[in-house]
Image: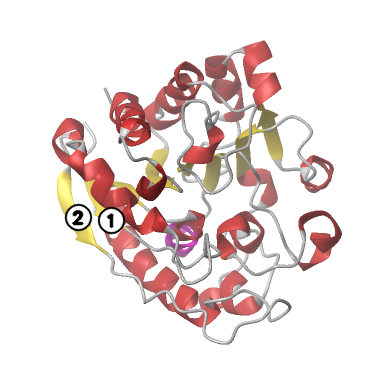
């Protein structure tokens, strides 16, 4: 039996403001899922919270690189310290975000320990970098860039913390749930990054796709892998409470099957959950679904 540790990382530093004068509400994700009784449902021990710096983009302007870069770098190191401690103790961190930039903390923690992989369940690749601005627009929001940064593509103050970049090798990354026709697919395939789109998952079945993707994420290739879950992988019909609710996403049963296989692997080292915004979920229905999916993965 694995010892689960529930750890809050309520950072919203990697997202643009949803409207002038406001801040992204994803920092409330952890509290909302805890209100669903997630700690008890997981049988987890309390890991506390890694408090993020204040959201303040100051005089940042488009073209200045990644906003909040200094704060993100400091937060990534602090979060990595906490995750590393749990991994060294043989514990399984379940990290509640926040936006997707918190995945950098897990990637850095694992890089300190050796070679690990990533299984990212996400509606987009979060692969924006200066080399593909013609496709994805200019860099700025790290929550749409964490995979690029983790694989060494991006400004060094985030992509090469402690001189350890890249934190992940391209061949050790598995992506699930990108929309069919995603503009990053050609570059991802050229880089050797494995991708299973929604259409492929639907054709082959979520369980078989997940099991096949685990090949190469076991010793001796890697010491294990981390699961990154972005709520926007779900179709907005069931998960509208995200910043980019793109149609054509996974259905809850499909995501449940993916998660069960990935999290159930003995080589899975941890899980983070991101992007759900309680401000966009007035009746709490989407949050309850997300809590059910996370708890069900460990049932």
Q: Nearer the viewer, residue 217 or 21?
A: 21
Q: Quadrant of the N terminus?
A: top left
> Which residue is found at the position 48% from the left and 25% from the top?
255
Residue 13 lies, in percent from the top left, at 47, 68
> Which residue is found at the position 40% from the left and 72% from the top?
75
> Which residue is found at the position 69% from the left and 20% from the top?
200
Q: Is residue 267 magenta?
A: no
Q: Earlier in the sequence, mark 1 or mark 2?
A: 1
Q: Which mark is residue 18?
A: none
Say what secondary structure mark 1 lies in. strand
Distance in Å between CA atoms under marks 1 and 2: 7 Å
How many discs mark residues in the rendered view?
2
Q: Is residue 155 above or below residue 243?
A: below
Q: Are marks 1 and 2 in contact (CB under 8 Å)?
A: yes
Q: Quadrant of the C terminus?
A: top left
Q: Find disc 1 in the rendering and name its residue.
A: 8
Q: How is the image coloured?
A: secondary structure
Q: Is residue 198 above or below residue 151?
A: above
Residue 159: image quadrant is bottom right
Residue 69: image quadrant is bottom right
Answer few, some or many: residues within 10 Å of disc 1's Cα (few below 14, many 20 plus, some between 14 and 19): many
Q: Is residue 111 magenta?
A: yes
Residue 53 lies, in percent from the top left, at 36, 76
In the rendered structure, which segment of residues is drawn in magenta?
Answer: 104-114
Observer able to see residue 219 = no
Query: Which mark's residue is nearer the viewer, 1 or 2?
Result: 1
Q: Find disc 2 in the rendering and name its residue.
A: 47
Q: Main secondary structure of the magenta part?
A: helix
Residue 174 lies, in percent from the top left, at 61, 38
Observer able to see residue 74 = yes
Answer few, some or many: residues within 10 Å of disc 2's Cα (few below 14, many 20 plus, some between 14 and 19): some
């Amino acid at each position: 039996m694995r010892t689960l540790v529930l750890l809050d990382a309520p950072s919203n530093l990697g997202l643009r403001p949803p409207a002038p004068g406001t801040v992204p509400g994803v920092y409330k994700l952890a509290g909302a899922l805890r209100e669903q009784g997630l700690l008890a449902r997981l049988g987890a021990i309390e890991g506390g919270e890694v408090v993020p710096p204040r959201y303040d983009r100051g005089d940042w302007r488009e073209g200045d690189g990644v906003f909040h870069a200094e704060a993100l770098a400091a937060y990534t190191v602090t979060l990595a310290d906490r995750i590393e401690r749990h991994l060294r103790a043989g514990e399984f961190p379940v990290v509640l975000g926040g936006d997707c930039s918190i995945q950098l903390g897990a990637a850095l923690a694992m890089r300190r320990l050796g070679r690990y992989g990533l299984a990212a369940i996400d509606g987009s690749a979060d692969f924006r970098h200066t080399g593909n601005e013609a496709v994805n627009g200019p860099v700025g929001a790290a929550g749409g860039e964490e995979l690029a940064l983790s694989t060494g593509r991006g400004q060094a103050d985030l992509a090469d913390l402690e001189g350890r970049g890249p934190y992940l090798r391209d061949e050790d990354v598995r992506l699930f749930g990108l929309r069919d026709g995603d503009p990053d697919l050609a570059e991802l395939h050229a880089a050797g990054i494995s991708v299973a789109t929604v259409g492929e998952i639907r054709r082959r079945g979520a369980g078989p796709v997940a099991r096949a993707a685990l090949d190469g994420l076991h010793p001796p290739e890697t010491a294990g892998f981390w699961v990154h879950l972005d709520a926007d992988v779900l179709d907005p019909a069931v998960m509208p409470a995200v910043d980019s609710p793109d149609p054509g996403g996974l259905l809850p049963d499909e995501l449940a099957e993916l998660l069960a296989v990935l999290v159930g692997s003995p080589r899975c080292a941890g899980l983070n959950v991101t992007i759900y915004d309680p401000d966009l979920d007035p009746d709490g229905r989407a949050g309850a679904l997300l809590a059910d999916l996370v708890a069900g993965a460990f049932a």
